[in-house]
Image (cartoon, rainbow, N blue to C red):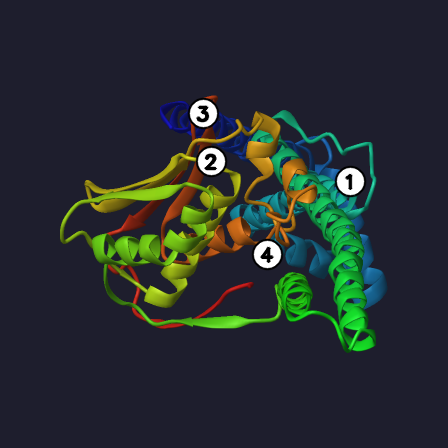
């Protein structure tokens, strides 16, 4: 965290340096413009009004008014004297203003190159697969770095979306294949029951029980299909209220008692008494149900699911751990991704649609919290951090489920 702050601070310092460099360059260009205007105006006055070109310019002016206005030589001279000789300051100022406008327009065209280069760079950013990039001036190095980060973030999001879609497609194939086994068993056992009317009651009860178990498994797989299809279609209304974490975790542990007991497992809950958060109880229950289910599915037999809940500053921290196989670092990075299932889940009935942890992550973040996972040879620990106070008023918040 400290390293991230230092990195942001260095980036801001680089940006400030680049902006100062840009301001210095613009100030220098403006001062140069003023100097050029003064020099050109002074030279023009010296040549046309007070210098070697004064007489040729006067003769040209008098000749022009005689031709176009039909005035005499004396009238033309008087007009020249009244218009120019008595108003040298005005004409000098007007000439300087014209020169300034021309030079200012040239300066604006020069600085507009920055925007043209930025525009070309953005076009390349929008163009898919554009390998080359528009090099920006040194003064815009901070924009160059920011656009590089944007390009990298867009590429990463695109890769993540493609990987998620591929995982979804793979999952559908796995589930479609998995559907065949329980369906074939249900049809087979029901056919036996239908064909053998004189089957002994004990054997009939056995076949019925097996068919029912396979039907339950079939229902579970179908529910996973429904989870996949409705993942991006729902909006959820958060109904916040005070939730006692010590009570809620104890209730969930009791609900999982039959599942854990069948494998010789048990739950041990250590929660700070009275620990409470402002949350949607149903949505929060789904988070901890998913974590309990995960711990029960992948923990070793005859081990405990450890649950701890405590206060840390202004947050409540809940950890759910189990003793089971170590999750490799690469898989640990993807474990909260949509439709991601570990290899072990694909070869057993424990694996779901790869949505449980992704849903848990989104619910926790919707409450202003965070969720993380750690795994080693001793245990796998999921940690949920939630704010103790309600940061936002209740309301309808979109939530991909």
Instruction: Give the Cα distance between marks 2 and 3.
Output: 46 Å
Q: Please tell me whether residue 126 is drawn above or below residue 35 in the rendered image.
A: below
Task: Check disc 2: other Cα within 10 Å, few if <14, some if 14-19, many if 20+.
Answer: some
Q: Name the residue under label 3.
A: 7
Q: Please tell me whether residue 249 is drawn above or below residue 320 in the rendered image.
A: below
Instruction: Give the Cα distance between marks 4 and 1.
Output: 17 Å
- The disc placed on residue 301 is 2
Instruction: Choose the circle earlier in sequence order: 3 or 1.
Output: 3
Instruction: Choose the circle earlier in sequence order: 4 or 1.
Output: 1
**Residues at marks 4 and 1 touching, judged by CB atoms closer than 8 Å:** no
Instruction: Give the Cα distance between marks 3 and 1.
Output: 68 Å
297, 5: nearer the viewer = 297
Q: Is mark 1 on a helix, strand or loop?
A: helix
Instruction: Give the Cα distance between marks 4 and 2.
Output: 112 Å
226, 88: nearer the viewer = 226
Q: Position of residue 116 (x, y in %)?
A: 73, 44
Q: Is mark 2 on a helix, strand or loop?
A: loop
Instruction: Give the Cα distance between marks 1 and 2.
Output: 111 Å
Q: Residue shown at 82%/33% (left/top)?
A: 131
**Residues at marks 4 and 2 touching, judged by CB atoms closer than 8 Å:** no
Q: In which quarter of the image is residue 355?
A: bottom right
Q: Name the residue under label 4.
A: 82
- The disc placed on residue 56 is 1
């Amino acid at each position: 965290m400290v390293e991230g702050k230092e990195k942001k601070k260095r980036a801001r310092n680089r940006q400030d340096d680049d902006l100062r460099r840009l301001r210095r360059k613009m100030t220098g260009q403006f001062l140069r413009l003023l100097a050029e205007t003064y020099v050109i105006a002074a030279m023009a006055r010296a040549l046309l009004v007070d210098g070697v070109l004064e007489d040729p310019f006067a003769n040209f002016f008098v000749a022009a008014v005689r031709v176009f206005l039909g005035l005499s030589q004396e009238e033309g001279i008087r007009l020249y004297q009244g218009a120019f000789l008595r108003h040298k300051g005005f004409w000098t100022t007007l000439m300087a203003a014209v020169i300034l406008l021309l030079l200012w327009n040239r300066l604006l065209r020069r600085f507009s190159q920055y925007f043209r280069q930025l525009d070309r760079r953005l076009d390349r950013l929008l163009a898919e697969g554009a390998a080359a990039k528009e090099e920006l001036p040194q003064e815009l190095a901070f924009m160059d770095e920011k656009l590089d980060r944007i390009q990298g973030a867009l590429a990463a999001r695109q890769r993540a979306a493609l990987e998620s879609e591929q995982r979804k497609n793979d999952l559908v194939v796995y589930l479609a294949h998995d559907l065949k086994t329980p369906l074939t068993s249900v049809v087979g056992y029901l056919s036996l029951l239908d064909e053998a009317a004189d089957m002994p009651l004990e054997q009939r009860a056995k076949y019925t029980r097996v068919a029912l178990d396979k039907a339950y498994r079939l229902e579970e797989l179908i529910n996973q299909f429904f989870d996949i299809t409705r993942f991006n279609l729902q909006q959820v209304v958060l109904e916040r209220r005070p939730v006692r974490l010590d009570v809620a975790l104890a209730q969930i542990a009791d609900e999982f008692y039959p599942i854990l007991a069948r494998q010789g497992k048990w739950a041990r809950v250590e929660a700070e008494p009275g620990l409470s958060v402002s949350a949607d109880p149903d949505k929060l229950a789904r988070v901890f149900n998913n974590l309990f289910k995960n711990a029960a599915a992948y923990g070793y037999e005859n081990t405990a699911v450890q649950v701890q809940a405590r206060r840390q500053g202004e947050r409540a921290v809940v950890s759910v751990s189990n003793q089971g196989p170590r999750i490799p670092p690469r898989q640990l990075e993807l474990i909260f991704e949509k439709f991601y299932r570990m290899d072990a889940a694909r070869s057993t009935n424990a694996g779901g649609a790869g949505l449980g942890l992704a849903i848990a992550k989104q619910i926790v973040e919707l409450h202003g919290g965070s969720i993380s996972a750690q795994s080693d040879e001793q245990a796998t620990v999921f940690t949920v951090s939630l704010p103790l106070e309600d940061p936002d008023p209740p309301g309808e918040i979109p939530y991909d489920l």
